[in-house]
């Protein structure tokens, strides 16, 4: 059995922890490897190793730090095909989608290559007589990232790209369900010239997360995962005096107005609801048609497109989506479909019990469509995170704005319309962090920042973009006075009042 080890101080190691977790191939349902799970001592050793390496990295000029990222990008691009296959083999998403996962991460690496410019401080010459003021951004030291299974390339790169460019050392605790790709990214960073210890990859579960949250040398924690755990990480991390950004779950709505381009909207909804088996925090699992006629037309148009969806193993180039990540997750999704039926929603397409010929053990869930879903239903209020599209009918634009605004989650939302004024009203009023206008999956580009609202984010500051640079640095402001060239100038008297700029 293959063992997936930690990467600490530039070396693969199983460290001292004795616990292991199975890593499955979701296409077949079989265990394909085991991953080591760190205990507190392993995490503390990785943090100590990073802390020892970090000062020299912080002292390396930002242009040289950026060159490592340039080289890393080149190395990742050179083997993106095999990296995507590795990712898919543990996650289950189709290989083309895994390439997208890696590519979106690389876009943040490209952004981080601009770190010399991003770290430039501010300078005021002559703020007072002989007085200049300047501010600079300094790294925090050792920072950590705890990431979910669904984007094992993009989300680690969102974090470590920016953190390392800023001069920090980074401990990555990836999901234990698909840990191989994050380790390979760590190896490629070393190949690109990153000093050992600046990116340590430590596998584990709650014990490893708690050890990171409690270690005083970890100055900041970035987390992406489900909301209850995000809230827990935020509370425990901030109680321990750390800076924390913890992104949580989602239930994104796609609102469709009567004037929307129907064919394009249907194509966008099907891709965003069922792509990656719905295991995306920016998926569109809820559609809100405005007006009964829009709802009926949309439903009729969706049905043949859903019927055409092809499920397959992740290496099948013709598959639209592959298996979900685990048997437990498949069962959870199917229990939510049963709940929807019990709650009185109309099950129009039922994806339960799907089997793929030749891969009967795989974790597949067929596409599912509900109509007449009501906001009070538990199956609507919760995140299902599977290939399940729920239609909630609204009468007016105001009602359609209210639904995502009053939902516990506020990650993403999309509006489909040809009306500028309606789009403007929607974007201004909706209580959601990331908005798409005729864009189904509005994940911001790397130089803007990612972050939802409400229970989708326990954070005061977003991920990547300039907010990412702010998160991973602290500002120091220096006020300096140089005596004039006249050596005989009179000494200024002591002052016992707060200095002001008269
Ligand atoms: P998860 O919450 O189960 O796991 C996330 C991380 O937390 C993993 O590294 C895991 O090892 C760790 N963890 C698990 N249980 C823990 C515990 N009890 N205590 C401490 N740490 C623990 O999430 P997941 O299933 O891997 O990912 C799917 C979830 O992530 C969905 O809810 C999805 O919406 C969310 N997500 C959010 C975003 C976003 O940006 N808002 C992006 C991607 C995924």
Image (tube, rainbow, N blue to C red):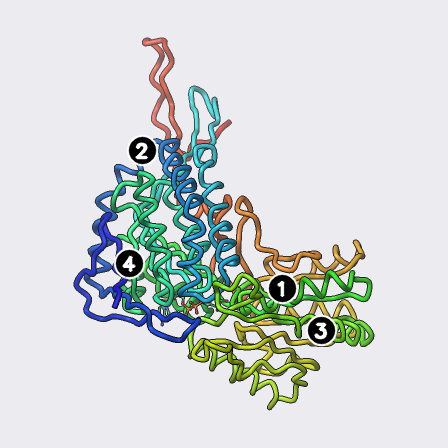
Q: Position of residue 318 (x, y in %)?
A: 57, 63
C-alpha distance separating marks 2 and 1: 44 Å
C-alpha distance separating marks 4 and 1: 34 Å
C-alpha distance separating marks 4 and 2: 25 Å
Q: Residue furthest bottom?
A: 342
Q: Identify the image quadrant of the N terminus.
A: bottom left
- Could you say whether the residue bearing mark 2 is in a helix, strand or loop? loop
* Label 4 residue near ligand 1, CB within 8 Å: no
Q: Residue at label 1?
A: 271
C-alpha distance separating marks 3 and 4: 46 Å
Q: Residue at label 3?
A: 304
* Label 2 residue near ligand 1, CB within 8 Å: no
From the viewer's side, name the closer residue of 213 and 443.
443
C-alpha distance separating marks 1 and 3: 14 Å
Nearest to viewer (mark 4 / mark 1):
1
C-alpha distance separating marks 2 and 3: 58 Å
Q: Residue at label 4?
A: 202
Question: For the residue carrying disc 3, how many other residues have a C-alpha within 10 Å: few (<14), some (14-19), or many (20+)?
Answer: few
The mark nearer the N terminus, 4 or 2, is: 2
Q: Residue at label 2?
A: 60
Question: For the residue carrying disc 1, how many other residues have a C-alpha within 10 Å: few (<14), some (14-19), or many (20+)?
Answer: many
- Could you say whether the residue bearing mark 4 is in a helix, strand or loop? loop
The mark nearer the N terminus, 1 or 3, is: 1
The mark nearer the N terminus, 2 or 1, is: 2
Image position of 112 (left or right of 1)? right
Question: How many callouts does the rendering have?
Answer: 4
- Could you say whether the residue bearing mark 3 is in a helix, strand or loop? helix
Q: Position of residue 134 (x, y in %)?
A: 43, 30
Q: Position of residue 92 (x, y in %)?
A: 46, 67
Picture layout, residue 128 above or below residue 99: above
């Amino acid at each position: 059995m293959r063992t997936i080890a930690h990467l600490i101080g530039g070396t693969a190691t199983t460290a001292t922890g004795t616990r292991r977790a199975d890593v499955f191939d979701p296409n077949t349902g079989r265990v394909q490897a085991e991953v080591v799970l760190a205990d507190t001592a392993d995490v503390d050793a990785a943090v100590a190793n990073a802390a020892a390496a970090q000062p020299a990295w912080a002292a390396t000029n930002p242009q040289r730090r950026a060159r490592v990222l340039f080289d890393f990008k080149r190395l990742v691009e050179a083997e993106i095909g095999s990296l995507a296959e590795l990712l898919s083999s543990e996650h289950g998403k189709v290989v083309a989608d895994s390439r997208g996962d890696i590519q979106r991460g690389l876009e943040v690496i490209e952004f981080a290559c601009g770190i010399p410019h991003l770290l430039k401080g501010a300078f005021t010459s002559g703020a007072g007589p002989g007085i200049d003021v300047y501010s600079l951004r300094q790294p925090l030291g050792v920072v950590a990232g705890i990431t979910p299974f669904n984007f094992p390339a993009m989300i680690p790169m969102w974090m470590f790209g920016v953190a390392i460019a800023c001069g920090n050392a980074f401990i990555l605790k990836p999901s234990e369900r698909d840990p191989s790709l994050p380790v390979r990214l760590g190896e490629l960073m070393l190949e690109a010239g990153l000093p050992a210890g600046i990116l340590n990859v430590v596998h584990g579960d709650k014990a490893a997360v708690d050890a990171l949250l409690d270690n005083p040398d970890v100055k900041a924690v970035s987390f992406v995962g489900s909301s209850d755990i995000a809230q827990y990480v935020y509370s425990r991390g901030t109680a321990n005096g750390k800076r924390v950004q913890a992104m949580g779950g989602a239930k994104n709505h796609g609102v469709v107005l009567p004037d929307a381009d129907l064919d394009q909207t249907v194509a966008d909804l099907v891709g965003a609801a069922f792509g990656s088996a719905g295991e995306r925090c920016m998926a569109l699992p809820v559609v809100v048609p405005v007006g009964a006629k829009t709802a009926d037309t949309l439903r009729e148009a969706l049905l043949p497109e859903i019927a055409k969806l092809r499920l397959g193993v992740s290496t099948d180039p013709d598959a639209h989506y592959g298996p979900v990540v685990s048997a437990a997750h498949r069962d959870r999704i199917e229990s939510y479909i049963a709940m929807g039926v019990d709650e009185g929603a109309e099950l129009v397409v039922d994806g339960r019990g799907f089997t793929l010929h030749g891969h009967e053990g795989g974790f597949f869930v067929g596409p599912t469509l509900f109509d007449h879903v009501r906001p009070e239903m538990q199956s609507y209020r919760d995140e299902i995170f599977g290939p399940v599209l729920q239609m909630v009918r609204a009468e007016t634009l105001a009602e359609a704005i209210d639904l995502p605004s009053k939902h516990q989650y506020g990650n993403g939302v999309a509006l489909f319309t040809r009306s500028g004024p309606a789009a403007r009203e929607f974007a201004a009023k909706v209580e959601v962090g990331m908005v798409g206008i005729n864009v189904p999956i509005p994940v911001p580009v790397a130089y803007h920042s990612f972050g939802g609202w409400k229970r989708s984010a326990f954070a005061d500051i977003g991920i990547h973009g300039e907010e990412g640079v702010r998160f991973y640095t602290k500002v120091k402001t220096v006020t300096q006075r140089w005596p004039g060239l006249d050596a005989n100038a009179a000494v200024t008297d002591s002052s016992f009042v707060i200095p002001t700029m008269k």
